[in-house]
């Protein structure tokens, strides 16, 4: 008899705009997984997909997925304002959930979803995609080599795509916050200060600068914008021994490690003579497996084993906590302290 471990896991992918088709493609390629449904409230978005994936049923009705007892899980890639309701209904109906970032619109909503998943014994995983990339995993490995960390500086700017229900921070900085948490461990920033501006719409900032003070004294800085003529995706991490440049737009040499450092002899400041050490630049080999392929497999593995995902609801909540603190800081025009 076939063991439970080998049963095909049937899944529904909800929201088939820009990101959803990537989830659909990756789940479809996994062994032991079948995308039984694709769902979007707009019929025209799945016309082409229906030809590409003939064995998947496409529907405008979420209920079709929920009422099908053979479907064990849903992956939700709809706009932020719908995440909470769609995830809550799925969990209530006994489905495991892979939910897009940012997890929900408030910490309260995130906590509710976590509690619900826990009480039902279901997997709730958040799509913090960058955590599953070869580049970010390599940087994590290299962090030890950097010495004392001085800073984390991220530039995540481009022209559009303006979201109707999320500010640029909730859309773009959510990535940096998840990367930051992955690299620096499960630590909450001590304080957050954010400044943002709304030039085009009244419901969300299109550009913002955030400063996060970490417990360890590191200052992290994130610049996110939809109003830049250029697309830039660069993170610099500086340490006392080495520094890293992560340029996500580089096709293959995404990570560069600079063997650079500065020493000061404070005993002898006249003449002031800092020592600048300039060594090699190393370009490490990266695992180039598509992050979503790793991630969709991980989700299926967690459903089978019951193990906690690497990016569980708790991680989604912490990112949303940082985003909420940014909003509060922008509203009040001052630094917001976060309790640990
Ligand atoms: N992880 C990543 O790197 C990444 C990248 C892009 C987007 N995202 C996230 O994915 C989500 C979707 O973003 P997008 O850029 O694909 O948006 P999008 O607007 O292109 O697509 C969203 C789709 O959801 C559909 N939809 C809306 N409400 C629905 C409902 N109740 N039921 C079914 N379908 C519904 C819309 O018709 C639309 O086709 C967002 O949360 C975004 O933050 C994540």
Image (cartoon, rainbow, N blue to C red):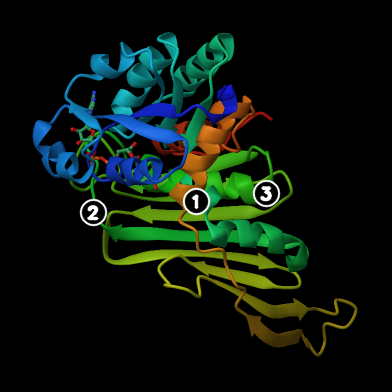
Q: Which residue is mark 3?
A: 184
Please tell me which of labels 3 and 2 falls first in the chain: 2
Q: Secondary structure at mark 1?
A: helix
**Where is residue 17 drawn, in percent x and y?**
22, 41
Residue positioned most to the front: 1
Up the image or down, 211 lies above or below 56; here it is below
Q: Which residue is mark 2?
A: 160
Q: Which residue is mark 1?
A: 130
Up the image or down, 292 lies above or below 98; here it is below
Most foreground residue, 26 or 70 = 70
Q: Secondary structure at mark 3?
A: helix
Please tell me which of labels 1 and 3 falls first in the chain: 1
**Where is residue 164 drawn, in percent x and y?**
21, 37
Q: Quadrant of residue 10?
A: top left
Please tell me which of labels 2 and 1 falls first in the chain: 1
CB of residue at label 3: within 8 Å of ligand 1? no
Q: Quadrant of ligand 1?
A: top left
Q: Quadrant of the N terminus?
A: top right
Disc 3 versus disc 2: distance between alpha carbons? 29 Å
> Marks 1 and 3: CB-CB under 8 Å?
no
Q: Quadrant of the C terminus?
A: top right
Disc 2 versus disc 1: distance between alpha carbons? 20 Å
Q: Given this view, does label 2 or label 1 mark the residue nearer the observer? A: 1
């Amino acid at each position: 008899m076939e063991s439970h471990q080998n049963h095909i896991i049937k899944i529904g992918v909800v929201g088939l705009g820009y990101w959803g088709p990537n989830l659909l493609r990756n789940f479809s390629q996994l062994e032991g997984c079948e995308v039984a449904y694709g769902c979007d409230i707009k019929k025209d978005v799945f016309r082409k997909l229906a030809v590409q994936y003939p064995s998947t049923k496409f529907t405008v009705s979420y209920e079709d997925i929920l009422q099908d007892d053979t479907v064990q899980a849903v992956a939700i890639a709809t706009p932020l304002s719908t995440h909470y309701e769609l995830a809550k209904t799925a969990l209530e109906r006994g489905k495991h959930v892979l939910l897009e970032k940012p997890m929900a619109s408030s910490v309260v909503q995130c906590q509710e979803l976590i509690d619900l998943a826990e009480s039902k014994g279901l997997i709730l995983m958040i799509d913090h995609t960058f955590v599953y990339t070869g580049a970010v995993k390599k940087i994590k490995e290299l962090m030890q080599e950097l010495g004392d960390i001085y800073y984390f500086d991220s530039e995540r700017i481009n022209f559009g795509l303006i979201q109707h229900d999320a500010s640029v921070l909730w859309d773009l900085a959510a990535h940096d916050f998840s990367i930051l948490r992955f690299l620096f461990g499960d630590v909450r920033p001590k304080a957050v200060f954010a400044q943002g501006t709304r030039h085009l719409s009244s419901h969300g900032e299109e550009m913002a600068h955030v400063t996060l003070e970490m417990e360890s004294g590191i200052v992290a800085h994130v610049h996110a914008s939809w109003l830049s003529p250029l697309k830039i995706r660069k993170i610099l991490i500086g340490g006392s021994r080495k520094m890293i440049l992560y340029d996500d737009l580089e096709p293959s040499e995404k990570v560069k490690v600079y063997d650079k450092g500065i020493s000061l002899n404070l005993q002898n400041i006249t003449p002031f003579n800092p020592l600048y050490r300039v060594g090699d630049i190393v370009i490490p080999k990266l695992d180039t497996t598509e992050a979503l392929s790793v991630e969709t497999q991980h989700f299926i593995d967690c459903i089978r084993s019951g193990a906690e995902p690497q990016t569980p609801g708790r991680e989604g909540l912490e990112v949303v906590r940082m985003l909420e603190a940014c909003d509060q800081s922008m509203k009040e025009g001052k630094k917001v302290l976060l309790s640990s």
